[in-house]
Image (cartoon, grey):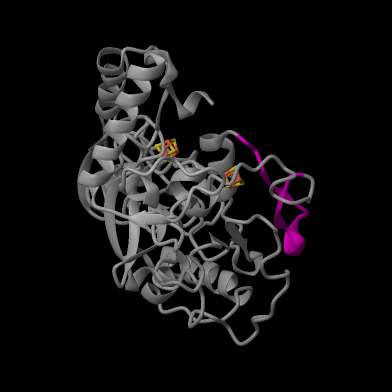
Amino acid sequence: MTVNITINGQKIQAQPEQTILEAAREHGINIPTLCYHKDLSPTGNCRICMVDVKGARFLQAACATQVWEGMEIETHGEKSIVSRKMTLEMMLANHPVDCLTCEANGDCELQDLAYEYRVEVPEWGTKGTHYPVDSDPNPFIFVDFNKCILCRRCVQACAEIQVRDVWGVAQRGFDETIVAGADTTMLEARCESCGQCVAYCPTGALTSKISRGLGRAPQVTKVTTTCTYCGVGCQLDLNVKDGKVIGVTSNPDAPVNGMALCVKGRYGWDFIHHPDRLTKPLVRQYLLSDQPKPKGKLGEWVEVDWDTALDITARKLSHARDTFGPDSVGILTSAKCLNEENYLMNKFARQVVGTNNIDHCARL
Ligand code: SF4
Ligand code: SF4
């Protein structure tokens, strides 16, 4: 059974359990939001999605109001626009004016709406910094609650997606603020640094500490790929600038994981360009000649091509197996390999080498 409603004069058939916002978006009608995110329960906190419903005494929050038969809605009537502008003005009045250097510049929903509705920081705004910048020692997450608009998306993302309940709301009125645990640090409040709260923050209040200063949204190209750390196979976007990975962000269309990533997938990318990373095979110098293994120091590492490295490995493995038996060899595979590669290593251990000594780093 469907419900007949009218939005901006357009007749629409909606599902009875849908909200005004869901019905509108399904039919390509834009209603602006800040606290709403389709992955999280609607709270109606920010009041940006207020719309005019015929017969209602007040504007209604589109994200939290269910449709009913015969409902007539105006999404961009004069009252809604005035209300949105006033709400935005109040948010901006408590917001630092530092878009020039803000990490979230170009990827900020508040900035987008202020631009769309032509709202500026009012004269009477405090323009000040109320909270310490970088207020939490979390190694991956930069916290600046001067930029928080109290939408509570971080609270919900942590509670509903990561189920850690790190963030909460303290105080009321002008003093209302987001706190970790009982106003402690994120890590003390059981944070596991997954960065879900960062991914859902619509402003620059929560950003990636390790990507800071490396490049902002308009400067990066997003390359969608699959995380190599474990078999879940989460999809993510590598943020690439000048040929270098400078961060990882969620890909909202990821089929396996949606916006969710764990700490490894979201923040474990710095090895890619790390100077210590091995990118070519290295072998000990003595292995390139027929010299016996030296006593004491094993000698210098020498860069070789893959054929040389693989020949040496095969020769040494065969020697160990033939001299000391197959069980003298043990094979350790990696979560960073594909399932198929791990399957092949299993076959290699049991059928080529002849040992059951094979294990996987995920069990260690
Ligand atoms: S990083 Fe993850 S666990 Fe920590 S507060 Fe954010 S959502 Fe919660
Ligand atoms: S993001 Fe985490 S859970 Fe997802 S594939 Fe990578 S390591 Fe596994």
Q: Over which residues does the magenta segment extend?
A: 164-181
Identify the residue shown where x is 27% and y is 32%.
314
User: Is 226 rendered above or below residue 76?
Assistant: above
Which quadrant of the structure image shows residue 320?
A: top left
Of 200 and 32, which appears nearest the observer? 200
Identify the residue shown where x is 41% and y is 71%.
216
Q: Position of residue 20 (x, y in %)?
A: 37, 44
Quarter of the image containing the C terminus?
Answer: top right
Q: Position of residue 227 (x, y in %)?
A: 36, 42
Which quadrant of the structure image shows residue 325?
A: top left
**Residue 173 lies in the magenta stretch:** yes
With 18 as the anchor, is 307 left or right in this view? left
User: Is 258 rendered above or below residue 285?
Assistant: above
**Residue 263 shows up from this direction:** yes
With 342 as the anchor, is 111 left or right in this view? right
Query: Ligand 1 quadrant?
Result: top right
User: Is 118 rendered above or below residue 281?
Assistant: below
- The residue most toward the front is 291
Q: Position of residue 349 (x, y in %)?
A: 32, 18
**Residue 44 shows up from this direction:** no
Of 315 and 339, which appears nearest the observer? 315
Quarter of the image containing the N terminus?
Answer: top left
User: Is 327 rendered above or below residue 91?
Assistant: above
Q: Position of residue 62 (x, y in %)?
A: 42, 48
